[in-house]
Amino acid sequence: MKRIGVDVGGTFTDLMYWDEAGSVSVHKIPSTPQDPSLATVNGVQQLADAAGISVSDLDQFLHGTTVATNIVLEHNGSDIGLITTEGFRDILHIARKKRPLNYSSYQDLPWQKWQLVRRRNRRVVPERINAAGEVLVPLDLDAVREQVRELKSSGVQAIAVCFLHSYRNPVHEQAVKRIIEQECPGMFVSLSSEVAPQYREYERFSTTALNAFVGPRVSGYIDSLAETTREAGVRGDIRLMTSAGGLISSRLAADNPVLLLTSGVVAGLLGGCAIGAASGHPSVITLDVGGTSADIGVAPDGKLRMKHLLDTRIGDYHAMVPMAEVDTIGAGGGSIAFVDAGGMFRVGPRSAGATPGPACYARGGTEPTSTDAMVAMGWLRADSFLSGSMFVDPQLATKSIDEHIAHKLDTSVEQAAIGIFQILAHAMTEAISLHSVRKGYDPRDFSLVAEGGAGPLYAWHIAEQLRVPRVIVPHHPGIASAMGLLSTDIRVETPATVWTSSTDPDLDRIAAEFDRLSTQAVEQLAGDGLDPSEIVLERSLDCRYIGQGYELRVPAPSGEVDAEWVARTAEAFHEVHERTYSQRFDDKPVHLVNVRVAAVGRVGHVPLADIEEGGPDASAAVKDTTEALFWTADNQPKTFDTPVYDRALLKAGNVFAGPAIVEQFDSTTVVGPQQTATIDRVGHIIIETAVSTEGGQR
């Protein structure tokens, strides 16, 4: 089995190859934002050559992409139409009561300012199905055909169909789809009963419209990539990472691109879970810092958490699809530092990206970035960046910092560079706090996994700020997301609304929906080539107390659906509610809203091989000494004679003290003053922070 994982980021495209013999190769090339498939295909060819294989030898091609995400964030999706029930034309405009600024009468509502569907393209037809799935008003087929023809003449590229209560009975939506296929062959069609078959009007409308909004371009990208890789010789189908942390076939992804909205960020968390488990520290916080953004995830005991329904958003829109608990902030190696009109020293979220890039890249960029700051501090060296394959110019870095920051603030270049680093590090620290401390998790119970090209440069400082006892820097930190693609399973999940209570449960309906969804999920994976014996089913429910407005996800108990099963489900919900909100109400009935079934196709994960043993003495790996800038307790610049280690020469058991710099092809690691680093059995750098020696570890 020969597998390759490709993660396309805003600045770099990361690739990792693995085969059953244990051979591992990694590669990293600049992304091609104008056509992401170019970097993908070129990188695959280059990595195959480096691994000594032909592209045609690859059995699996696993892919994480930000194409769908970028379309939504940049508001440049397709011109789409909407067909809905009479009286519900403006659901997408009205949305929910919640507003970005609760007390302002003068605010742009983003879902109105950047409409997914323009009002003239929102069309209504006579039909009505009630909440029990009963047809109250038959669908007017002639009206549907007329509206479809008018949308076609208006030039829409996709049509979303959202009828009231179609999650209980999809017959009317299916009839509309048949008419669209007759009148508009090749038109991208998005049905709410297929995309989001669960209750909640606005969220279901928004999710279905989002699917249509990104559909034509994303499906075109997937089809183009599939064709290009086939021409290059790749035999296997492309599997794409979903927002929930599973892999799906290219066919399913092309039909339901809304499942890919956070595809590009989940792989890093999955990679972090595998890295933490291999080092014996399963509870991890992942910090994946690339050139444009930082992705932050929290996985207690190495298990992904799913976002609450209120948080499953992308940009300004609700997306009612499963999403792993990972969030992104505009903080990366390319984040631009500036002094604003009010004299405030700021960094990001604007980024220099891959083009022109930081000033030190000598590609035309003149504004100082986070990367320029670390070049000026001596952490990134001119002839060692990407193992010397890419030259950086320290003079251009210091010049940009001097002109744009130091001169304006009447300070030194050294102090300005430290400020750039600390401001961006603070933004990351606050984001991690938001997803750990404020959600009931103590960072002292976790390890911080540093990923991405820039994560290992920041992690040592952020860990001390959060009092995290240790940092884990994986063997290939800049390729961790690609590794995450090779560390997950094929997975599809489908929901159904049951709407019943623990005091008077509809046991037959719950059991019937679980059976229907299980059959549907197994057929889906079997259609993608998996043997039923390789498929594992995972059941869960969305529950809440009677009277609450939103649900929490609860693992479904095993066994037959009977009164005792309902009681165990209620107890499981009480426990989840107490864990989330620090309260439980045992005397309150539990409302069972949705049931879910996930079908998981187990695939071989990448095992992390042990590296060569060595003693505590790491001096053989020292390749140089450099002057590196840090700071004192009162934040004054201080230069240290800092040893520079070659990552490839470090052996298991090696120990060294900070400050230190560790260089490798895909990243550079900084070990701070008063910290100690140890190389574990699989080659990870374990940095024990000063907090550990102070007794902060729990």
Image (spheres, grey):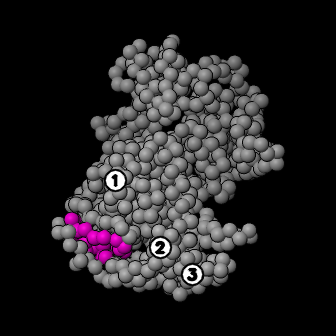
Disc number for residue 413: 3
**Three-letter residue code for mark 3:** Val
Check disc 2 and report the residue beneath it.
631
Nearer the observer, disc 3 or disc 1? 1
Looking at the rendered structure, the secondary structure element under dot 2 is: strand
* Residue that extends furthest to the right in the rendered view of this protein: 105
Examine the rendering and report whether any part of residue 230 can be seen. Answer: no
Looking at the rendered structure, the secondary structure element under dot 1 is: loop
Above or below, 607 against 128 in this view is below
Classify the position of the N terminus by image quarter. Answer: bottom left
Is mark 3 in CB contact (under 8 Å) with mark 1? Answer: no
Q: Residue at x 30, y 70 (%)?
A: 657
Residue nearest the observer in this picture, 436 or 483: 436
Kindly indicate the quadrant of the structure image that contains residue 400.
bottom right
**Three-letter residue code for mark 2:** Trp
Residue nearest the observer in this picture, 32 or 584: 584
What is the x, y in percent for residue 260? Answer: 52, 49
What is the x, y in percent for residue 582? Answer: 49, 32
Above or below, 284 against 675 in this view is above
Check disc 1 and report the residue beneath it.
695
Assess disc 1: are there few (<14), some (14-19) or many (≥20) residues with their C-alpha within 10 Å of its C-alpha: few
Number of on-image labels: 3
**Three-letter residue code for mark 1:** Gly
Disc number for residue 12: none
